[in-house]
Amino acid sequence: MMIKLMRRVRARGEEGFAMVAVIAIGSVLTILAVAGVAYTVGSLNKAGNDQDYNAALAAAYAGVEEYQSLLANDPSYIRYGNAASSHTSYVDPAKPAEVSNVITPPTANPAFGLGTAGTWASVPGSNGEAKYRYEVNNAKYYSEGTVTLRATGKVGNSTRSIVADLKQSGFVDYVWFTDLETSDPYNEASVCARHFWDVPGRPYNTGTCSDIHFRNGDTFTGDVHSNDRMLIDCGVVIEGVVTTAYNPATGNKYLGSGCTPTFLKGAPQYSGYIDIPPTNTEMKKETRTDLPTEVPNPGCLYTGPTSITFTDDGYMTVISPYTKKTQVAGSPATSGTEANTLCGAKGTGSGQLGNAGGAKVKVPANNLVYVQSVPSTTTDPNYTATTTSVTALGTCKGSDAFNAVGYPATGEQVPAAINSVPSYGCRNGDVFVKGTLSGQVTVASENYAYIVNDIVYKNDQTDVLGLVGQNAIYIYAPVKKNSNGTYTCIVVCDEDREVDAALLSVAHTITVQNYTLSVGGHTFGDLKITGSIAQKYRGIVIQNSGYLKDYKYDKRFKYTAPPKFLTPASTTYGVSTWVEINAVFKASGAYS
């Protein structure tokens, strides 16, 4: 079709239309190659010999690309559009009712025009003959990280429209993402906290740093990316695309062991650096009530150690004894509200957050839960003095290395503190998660996140979980030391562990507790993770004990993301799906 279009344009001798044809070709190839989109053409009354008709589709593509460029330059542009557009009334029948929440931008955008008197944006190089409009619907952005754009191109008296879902590029695009291919030095000043390609780089094979291999038998069903050089053994199988920010002038972009691993989609290729934000505190903003435009649907804020158990009826049981206000205003917070119905009520009575039985609340629909450490500022609505004793499943106060939600277990050999941060600090923003999820939610913690038992979906087509730890995400594997010096598990650990989630450790690693100890002299079983894994440093899951890896990518993450999930410091928007529809506007500008 594009070759014919070029011929027709040349026959007319109109250079503007030639530029439209070039844009058409570039746009189509870019969308298909970069986004891997599905192309579905509706049943249309197609004027096959009308070059304006063909060029109008190219103009619609150009509109999508121009909007992508605006988002790349300013991610907050997601807020802007024309609220009068009929596209803003979008409601997805498969999800709770959501409508677009766009506002007028401070600088006029001609592509937001509506009606016969409304403006159109011109395709560059077309001498004003090729134009486009687009209508923005951001209803799914706040829950899934996607925005729907309905773009209409116009050339002469012909108009054509497409609908494109734009998704943020992010950590959930990969089954495995790592910033640094070394074990966690727990010290940002360490020479090990460098990439192999940095200047000066991380020492390798000197005994100083512990670079970690993809081991024989490891299989990855999705795409893999590392910002570092990867060490990949012969028996590794990677079924997806492998990319790295390590780009030697010659030689492989990974270090093998004398043979070639199985790369089903080709050897590792260079790709740009993906920057992990330094903290996940931006996610805490999603619990604020004083930002109605940026946060139209605030989530739940819990304070201090918090236990969350999902149940397959769409609820979760939350134990969080330090929590007073579950939503706040200000940064730092100066006031707060107790969202009883959404997040649970404070107090120690039956059904309340400070009770040993916890509060049973519905999983916040398409929303976020954030667990913060107990604030040290006395004016914070969730402040509790260090001298105050808090009790739920255990009493704690001050800097006690145990907490009020039941950790450590009785007799547990408590893992050593990391950077002076204890494993079970009394006032730390740690979250302990398990259960069967029925819903869509992201859980984030200011400190550690513990997976204390299986976390599985009731429905693997509709349920989705994001789990983000500022520090490490631990696979809980508590052990006790016997009188003869050996170690045994406190809870059952000689069976598979299943986790359905997108996992992200912002500053540290995803790892198994006590992997350095010989516990029972054998592996615990398989660690079955279905979702995505992203971390600052490579986490060890088996050494003297631990789990064998069985990681599978949740393919839904190519098109959507867990609600309000953390994205890279610099992000772009790619087209995840698009479809041509009947023209939305007539050439006059009126709705069809």
Image (tube, helix red, strand yellow):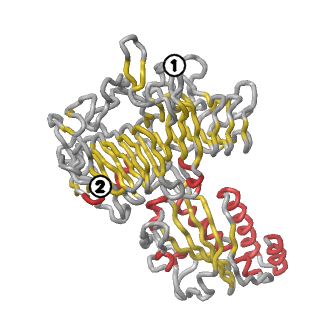
Q: Check the image and report above or below for 47 versus 434.
A: below
Q: Is residue 266 shown to the viewer in this render?
A: yes
Q: Is residue 72 shown to the viewer in this render?
A: no
Q: Where does residue 80 sit, x and y in percent of width and height?
A: 46, 69
Name the residue rendered at 49%, 37% in the picture: 497
Residue 508 in the figure: left or right of residue 323: right
Classify the position of the N terminus by image quarter: bottom right
Q: Disc number at residue 192?
A: none
Residue at the outermost top position: 484
Classify the position of the C terminus by image quarter: bottom right
Give the image quarter of residue 224: top right
Q: Nearer the viewer, residue 236 or 469?
A: 236
Name the residue rendered at 53%, 32% in the picture: 538
Q: Nearer the viewer, residue 245 or 174?
A: 174
Q: Nearer the viewer, residue 401 or 75?
A: 401
Element carrying mark 2: helix
Instruction: Identify residue for label 1.
Output: 521
Residue 105 in the figure: left or right of residue 12: left
Residue 422 in the figure: left or right of residue 229: left
Q: Earlier in the sequence, mark 1 or mark 2?
A: 2
Element carrying mark 1: loop
Name the residue rendered at 53%, 22% in the picture: 522
Residue 103 in the figure: left or right of residue 9: left
Q: Residues within 10 Å of mark 2 (few under 14, many from 20)?
A: many
Q: Where does residue 119 sit, x and y in percent of width and height?
A: 54, 81
Give the image quarter of residue 298: bottom left
Q: Disc number at residue 343?
A: 2
Q: Where does residue 438 sit, x and y in percent of width and height?
A: 43, 55
| Distance Cα–Cα, label 1 vs label 2 | 43 Å
Q: Residues within 10 Å of mark 1 (few under 14, many from 20)?
A: few
